[in-house]
Structures are given as structure tokens and as C-alpha cells.
Image (cartoon, helix red, strand yellow):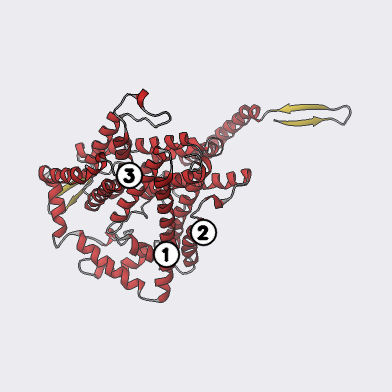
Amino acid sequence: MFSLHIGRPPHHKTLSIRPAWLLAPLGLAAAALIGLFQGAFQSTTLALALVGIGLALLWLALILVKPEAALLIYTLLAVNLNSFDLPLPVGGTRVSPDIVLVSLLMLGMILRMLTLRRSLTILPILAPYLVFLAVPLITLLWTPTPLESVRGLFRFIGYLALMWLIVDVIVSKAQVRRMVLVLILSTLIPIISGFYQAITGSGQFIWAGAGFNRIYGFAGGPFTLAFYLVMIMPLVLIFLLEQRQEQDQDAPAGRWRFNRLGLGLLLGLIGVALVLTFIRGAWIAVVASLLLLGLARGSLRYRQLLLTIPAAAGVVLLTFTPALERLQQAADPTSTLFGRLEVWRLAVDWLLASPLNLLAGVGMKAFEYYYVLLAGPTTAGLYWRRESFLIGNRPHNELLGFMLDVGLIGVVALLVVFFTLGRLAWRIYRNAQDRDLRLVALAFLIGFAGLLVGAAADNVFSQPSVAVYFWIMAGLVMAIDRHMMRDA
């Protein structure tokens, strides 16, 4: 509420006005203005732009007024938002819904910091993360692909804003539970759309000794969907195994209760979807991570994973011939495995070309949009199919990929970030008195381990639709450590 004084004292009147009263006249004025513009220009592009601006302002208002709701919505939909473009490219550059939402998340973070006088230092990973960001910022001075470098840098700034909002907003166990529930439910859209692709044969078809219809839902690609599921699957499995079979009234007060049947059904659907992506690296990663889960927990229900996971993998390979053929195809001389070995050799050559390349990299995203094309079309075995297949392809090894992006300095900083997050999660898992918070930390550690295994031969942490869920769960770990460990 604010007041207006009309006239001179002592003969003046005071009018008290509530901001909400202004919504109707401002809305009518905006509607009239839009009508005048549309009537004058008769432009479909203008109409779409106006609608987009309105939705953007609504999203920004939600971030500022109901930040938890904004985080829940983004978490639910993020895996689906980077697979298509908006009909309004900026300067010829593709603009996805994810880029728009993340941009406004960054703006919302800045406004929240200024209005509430909060500090960036609430993130324990801030110092090494800023070092990681500083390297590609400096290499913008000489990178051959400045636009792509800025876009890659923008993504990691967006992850920082997302984590900051989570740590600032998620301050109670009830809020963590809602985030966990939405993380689990986020699997529904990509799985359902992926099954539609499997049934109709409308997935990504490849010929690799045999034909494979690889599903990807709205995730943008089969390996994106696969590694997203590698990150989320341990969360579903852990809470399924922890659901007590006793009646609800026998469960300790305050424990999270999820529908056991629903979790079991969802876990089965995740497993089927993961197989139908035909991403071998993701298969290996999920088996390795779930075996690690069996070793990490001492109870029988977890130790049985050491037998059931290999047995389930064997049953799939024996009963589903395409999966076995896909696995065997890795040894074929025409397999992409050998093409990746060529890319790795080329990546090492560029890193060793100069000390500066080794220390600071060749520029964020510069390798896959410039340097790989210099030798790719003329190098035998280097993705022999077509030159256009090379564009945008990283080395399929995240250590080499980030060495090319940010060099040794940036990679060391990123490893410090990973080590700090792993240490925080391990401390929560070992020391928190609250079982549910311990399970969230454990799920993060197991999913993180799966991504590390996959990162040896795939682009994982550099893929937005996968990485965003890693950073969301990292934000939850930091929020638990900051706000709940004292009471947990």
C-alpha cells in the first residue's frame, strides 16, 4: 500500500492505494495497446512476440512471488524443454524454451539477491565454480566460435543461478520432499512420449549392423533421455526399497510415504525406456551405479542388488535380441566406438598443440563447432558418414571435452566442485539423523557415480537436459547441508 497527498497542508487529502487495485486498469491499458499495435501492423510475428513477452513476465513474477512453485515447475519440465525451438529466433540463433526460462531464472536470482540482500556465498562451491566460469570468459578473446562459446558459458551461469535459488528457497524438509516428488514425476512425460515413439516407430532410427528405433521422448536425443534416467533411477529405486511394508500407522511420524506400487511400476517403466534408448554407455553406467548402491547399504534388501541387477541384465540380453545385437555391435570395425577413438586422438592433438591450449583450452564449444571440422572430413574412420554429423559433436569423453573447453585450470576447478558436492552428500548420508534426508544424499551420490561412468564415453555433464538434473540435486544437497543438518 502507498499513499498520495493531494493539496497543500493542512487542507490536503490522503489517498491510500493498494498495488492490486492497479492491476485492472493496467491490464486494460496493456490490452488496448496490444490491440492498437496488432491492428496497425497485422503481424503474426508481433502477436507471437507479445504473447511470449506476456508469458515471460508471468514466469518472472512467479519466480519473484512464488519461487518454490517456479522451481517445482522447472524441475518437472526441464528434460523436455531443450528439444524444440521457439518460432522467434534471435539473430538467427535458435532459442529454446529452456534458454528463456533459465534466462529469467537468472534475472529472478539477481532481483531476489538485491531485494532481500542475499549473498552468492550461500553456495559452498562458489569459489571453484567462479574459477571454472572465468576461464571460458577469458578465452572469448581468441575463440574461433564466440557465439557458441557464449552459449556454452551461459548454460553454466544458469546452473549457478538455479542452485542459488534452490539453496535460498528450499529451507525445510517438507520442501525437499516436494522437490523429490517432482523429480520422480518428471520421468512421466519423457517415458510416455518415448513409448509412443517405440510403438509407432517414430524414434531415432539408426542402422548399425541392424536397424534400431531409439526412443528419446522430448529429451532431444536417445543418449540425453538415457543419462537423465541414469541420474533419476537411483532416486526411485532407493525410496521404493525404503518403503515399509507395515501399515502407515506403524511407520515413524514424519517419515516420507510414497505409494509402493506406483514406485515399482515407474521403476519398471524407467528400465524398459532405458533399454529402448539403445545407449550402451547408459546401460553400463546404470548397472555399475546400482551395484555400487548394493555395496553402499548394509541391509539385505540392498545387498540383493548385487545378484538381481546382473541377473536382470542377463535376462534382458537373452530375451531381447536387439539389445544383445546392439551390445555386440560395439566390437564391429564400423562401430562408432572406433570413430570416437579417432576423435579422442584429434582432441589430444589440439590440447598438446600449445601450452595455452593445455592450460586454458581452445574455447568453450570451439572444438565441436570448429576444430573437429578441420580434420574430420579427411580423417579415415572419423565419423565417416557425413561432414554435417561432426558439427556440434564433443569428443564423447567429458574429461577431454572439458579440457578442450576450459583447459587444465578449469578442469581442476570443476573437479573441486565435484569433490565438494560429493563430500557434502557423504556427510549428510553418514551424519544426518533424518533417514529421508540421508536417502536424498545417497541418491545423489549413486546417480553421480552413474554419470561419472557414462562420462568416460559420452557427453553427460555438458548436455543441458541431463546436467540440469545433476545440478538440481546438487542444489538440494547444499540446501539440506545449510538449512537442515542442525535439526536433522
Can you identify the residue that label 3 sits on?
219
Badge 3 element: loop
Q: Nearer the viewer, mark 2 or mark 3?
A: 2
Amino acid on which disc 2 is placed: Ala
Query: Relative to residue 405, is residue 137 drawn left or right?
Result: right
Q: Residues within 10 Å of mark 1 (few under 14, many from 20)?
A: some
Look at mark 1 in the image and give the residue it sits on. 412
Residue 227, placed above or below residue 333? above
Q: Residue 37: x and y, percent?
A: 56, 37
Whole-percent x and y of residue 262? Answer: 29, 30
| Distance from the alpha carbon under mark 2 to that under mark 1 | 12 Å
In the rendered view, does 53 fall on the left or right side of 451? right
Name the N-terminal-most of marks 2 and 3: 2
For the residue marked with disc 3, what is the amino acid? Ala
Q: Are marks 2 and 3 in contact (CB under 8 Å)?
A: no
The mark tally for this picture is 3
Check residue 127 in the rendering and tell me which mark sits there, or answer none: 2
